Image: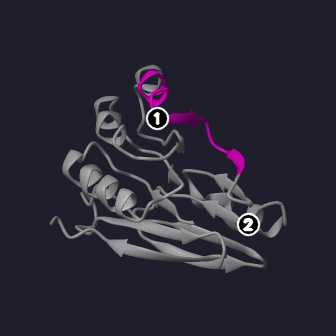
Amino acid sequence: MVIGIFSDSHDNIFRIREAVELFNSWSCQLVIHAGDYIAPFAIREMRKIACPVRGVFGNNDGERQGLSQMFKLIGEIKDPPFSLEALKTRILILHDPAFAGSLAKSGDYDLVVCGHTHHPEIRREGSCLIVNPGECGGWLTGKATVAKFDPESGQAEVIELTGG
Protein backbone atom coordinates (compact mmCIF):
# COMPACT_ATOMS: atom_id res chain seq x y z
CA MET A 1 0.00 0.00 0.00
CA VAL A 2 1.26 3.45 -0.91
CA ILE A 3 0.02 7.01 -0.48
CA GLY A 4 1.52 9.58 -2.83
CA ILE A 5 1.90 13.10 -1.43
CA PHE A 6 2.57 16.39 -3.14
CA SER A 7 2.04 20.10 -2.61
CA ASP A 8 2.75 23.51 -4.06
CA SER A 9 2.58 22.46 -7.70
CA HIS A 10 1.94 26.10 -8.70
CA ASP A 11 0.69 25.40 -12.25
CA ASN A 12 3.88 23.58 -13.32
CA ILE A 13 2.16 21.16 -15.70
CA PHE A 14 5.41 19.38 -16.58
CA ARG A 15 6.18 18.60 -12.93
CA ILE A 16 2.55 17.66 -12.20
CA ARG A 17 2.71 15.24 -15.14
CA GLU A 18 5.93 13.75 -13.79
CA ALA A 19 4.44 13.37 -10.30
CA VAL A 20 1.31 11.70 -11.72
CA GLU A 21 3.44 9.20 -13.68
CA LEU A 22 5.46 8.44 -10.55
CA PHE A 23 2.35 7.96 -8.38
CA ASN A 24 0.87 5.62 -10.98
CA SER A 25 4.13 3.67 -11.22
CA TRP A 26 3.95 3.17 -7.43
CA SER A 27 0.34 1.90 -7.76
CA CYS A 28 -0.82 4.43 -5.15
CA GLN A 29 -4.12 3.71 -3.46
CA LEU A 30 -4.48 7.39 -2.51
CA VAL A 31 -2.82 10.66 -3.51
CA ILE A 32 -2.85 13.73 -1.26
CA HIS A 33 -2.18 17.31 -2.41
CA ALA A 34 -1.55 19.88 0.35
CA GLY A 35 -2.55 22.96 -1.63
CA ASP A 36 -1.36 25.69 -3.99
CA TYR A 37 -2.49 24.22 -7.29
CA ILE A 38 -3.15 27.82 -8.45
CA ALA A 39 -5.42 27.50 -11.52
CA PRO A 40 -8.10 24.94 -12.41
CA PHE A 41 -6.26 23.86 -15.57
CA ALA A 42 -3.59 22.28 -13.33
CA ILE A 43 -6.18 19.68 -12.27
CA ARG A 44 -6.56 18.38 -15.85
CA GLU A 45 -3.20 16.63 -15.64
CA MET A 46 -4.11 15.21 -12.23
CA ARG A 47 -7.11 13.46 -13.82
CA LYS A 48 -4.61 10.81 -15.00
CA ILE A 49 -3.95 9.69 -11.42
CA ALA A 50 -5.21 6.10 -11.16
CA CYS A 51 -6.62 6.41 -7.63
CA PRO A 52 -8.66 8.88 -5.55
CA VAL A 53 -7.12 12.27 -4.77
CA ARG A 54 -7.79 14.27 -1.60
CA GLY A 55 -6.58 17.80 -1.15
CA VAL A 56 -6.88 21.16 0.53
CA PHE A 57 -6.76 24.71 -0.72
CA GLY A 58 -3.54 26.65 -0.24
CA ASN A 59 -2.98 30.34 0.30
CA ASN A 60 -2.41 30.98 -3.43
CA ASP A 61 -5.51 29.16 -4.71
CA GLY A 62 -7.65 32.11 -5.75
CA GLU A 63 -9.93 30.34 -8.24
CA ARG A 64 -11.56 28.09 -5.65
CA GLN A 65 -14.84 27.61 -7.47
CA GLY A 66 -13.08 26.44 -10.63
CA LEU A 67 -10.72 24.22 -8.65
CA SER A 68 -13.69 22.68 -6.79
CA GLN A 69 -15.48 21.94 -10.07
CA MET A 70 -12.43 20.33 -11.67
CA PHE A 71 -11.62 18.39 -8.48
CA LYS A 72 -15.00 16.65 -8.59
CA LEU A 73 -13.56 14.60 -11.47
CA ILE A 74 -10.68 13.21 -9.38
CA GLY A 75 -11.68 13.25 -5.74
CA GLU A 76 -12.32 15.75 -3.00
CA ILE A 77 -10.93 19.17 -2.06
CA LYS A 78 -11.71 21.11 1.11
CA ASP A 79 -10.53 24.04 3.15
CA PRO A 80 -7.89 22.92 5.62
CA PRO A 81 -7.86 21.17 7.98
CA PHE A 82 -9.23 18.12 6.17
CA SER A 83 -9.30 14.91 8.22
CA LEU A 84 -9.99 11.50 6.79
CA GLU A 85 -9.32 7.84 7.36
CA ALA A 86 -7.87 5.79 4.54
CA LEU A 87 -5.88 2.57 4.38
CA LYS A 88 -6.28 2.18 8.16
CA THR A 89 -4.52 5.53 8.62
CA ARG A 90 -5.96 8.59 10.36
CA ILE A 91 -4.84 11.51 8.18
CA LEU A 92 -4.98 15.27 8.57
CA ILE A 93 -4.23 17.51 5.58
CA LEU A 94 -3.16 21.12 6.08
CA HIS A 95 -1.47 23.65 3.84
CA ASP A 96 0.30 25.86 6.38
CA PRO A 97 2.38 23.78 8.81
CA ALA A 98 2.05 26.27 11.69
CA PHE A 99 -0.08 23.91 13.80
CA ALA A 100 1.13 20.59 12.38
CA GLY A 101 3.21 19.73 15.43
CA SER A 102 0.51 20.42 18.01
CA LEU A 103 -2.12 18.61 15.96
CA ALA A 104 0.23 15.64 15.54
CA LYS A 105 0.79 15.53 19.30
CA SER A 106 -2.97 15.32 19.89
CA GLY A 107 -2.88 11.57 19.26
CA ASP A 108 -5.83 11.87 16.86
CA TYR A 109 -3.76 11.23 13.70
CA ASP A 110 -1.23 8.80 12.32
CA LEU A 111 -0.18 11.13 9.49
CA VAL A 112 -0.26 14.92 9.18
CA VAL A 113 0.44 16.26 5.69
CA CYS A 114 1.30 19.91 5.07
CA GLY A 115 3.02 22.09 2.50
CA HIS A 116 3.47 25.85 2.07
CA THR A 117 7.17 26.13 2.98
CA HIS A 118 8.42 24.59 -0.29
CA HIS A 119 10.98 22.66 1.77
CA PRO A 120 10.58 18.91 2.34
CA GLU A 121 10.47 17.66 5.88
CA ILE A 122 9.62 14.37 7.54
CA ARG A 123 9.50 14.23 11.31
CA ARG A 124 7.78 12.31 14.05
CA GLU A 125 5.78 13.87 16.86
CA GLY A 126 4.94 11.06 19.25
CA SER A 127 3.28 8.30 17.22
CA CYS A 128 2.33 10.66 14.37
CA LEU A 129 4.41 11.28 11.26
CA ILE A 130 4.43 14.80 9.79
CA VAL A 131 5.20 14.94 6.07
CA ASN A 132 5.84 18.08 4.05
CA PRO A 133 6.70 16.89 0.54
CA GLY A 134 8.30 20.20 -0.44
CA GLU A 135 7.32 21.80 -3.71
CA CYS A 136 6.24 19.79 -6.71
CA GLY A 137 6.47 22.88 -8.92
CA GLY A 138 10.14 23.52 -8.20
CA TRP A 139 9.80 27.25 -8.88
CA LEU A 140 11.08 28.60 -5.56
CA THR A 141 13.87 26.23 -4.55
CA GLY A 142 14.81 24.78 -7.93
CA LYS A 143 14.03 21.29 -6.59
CA ALA A 144 10.76 19.57 -7.43
CA THR A 145 9.87 16.96 -4.84
CA VAL A 146 7.04 14.61 -3.82
CA ALA A 147 6.71 12.08 -1.02
CA LYS A 148 5.78 8.44 -0.68
CA PHE A 149 4.12 7.10 2.49
CA ASP A 150 3.76 3.42 3.38
CA PRO A 151 0.82 3.02 5.82
CA GLU A 152 1.96 -0.46 6.86
CA SER A 153 5.42 0.59 8.02
CA GLY A 154 4.47 4.16 8.92
CA GLN A 155 7.53 5.37 6.98
CA ALA A 156 7.82 8.10 4.36
CA GLU A 157 10.48 9.31 1.98
CA VAL A 158 10.93 12.39 -0.19
CA ILE A 159 11.72 11.82 -3.85
CA GLU A 160 13.16 14.48 -6.14
CA LEU A 161 11.60 14.72 -9.57
CA THR A 162 14.27 14.61 -12.23
CA GLY A 163 12.43 16.03 -15.21
CA GLY A 164 12.92 12.82 -17.12
Q: Is residue 1 left or right of residue 144?
A: right
Label whose residue precedes the other's in the sequence (2 or 1):
1
Q: Which residues are magenta?
A: 68-85
Q: Residues within 10 Å of mark 2 (few under 14, many from 20)?
A: many
Along the line of sight, the residue nearer the viewer: 13 or 88: 88
Measuring 45% from the left and 61% from the top, which residue is drawn there? 117
Residue 4: where, in percent of width, then height? 48, 60
Q: Which residue is mark 1?
A: 74
Q: Up-down: is 106 above or below 72?
A: below
Q: Which residue is mark 2?
A: 110
Using the numbered discs, state the Cα–Cα distance from disc 2 to disc 1 in whole angstroms: 24 Å
Q: What colour scheme has been applied to the protein in the rendered image?
A: one colour
Residue 164: where, in percent of width, then height? 15, 66
Secondary-structure class at tag 1? loop
Measuring 50% from the left and 52% from the top, which residue is drawn there? 31
Q: Is residue 69 magenta?
A: yes
Q: Is residue 22 left or right of residue 113?
A: left
Query: What amino acid type should be assigned to the residue bearing mark 2?
Result: Asp
Measuring 29% from the left and 65% from the top, which residue is drawn there? 144
Residue 77 quadrant: top right
Residue 90 quadrant: bottom right
Along the line of sight, the residue nearer the viewer: 161 or 87: 87
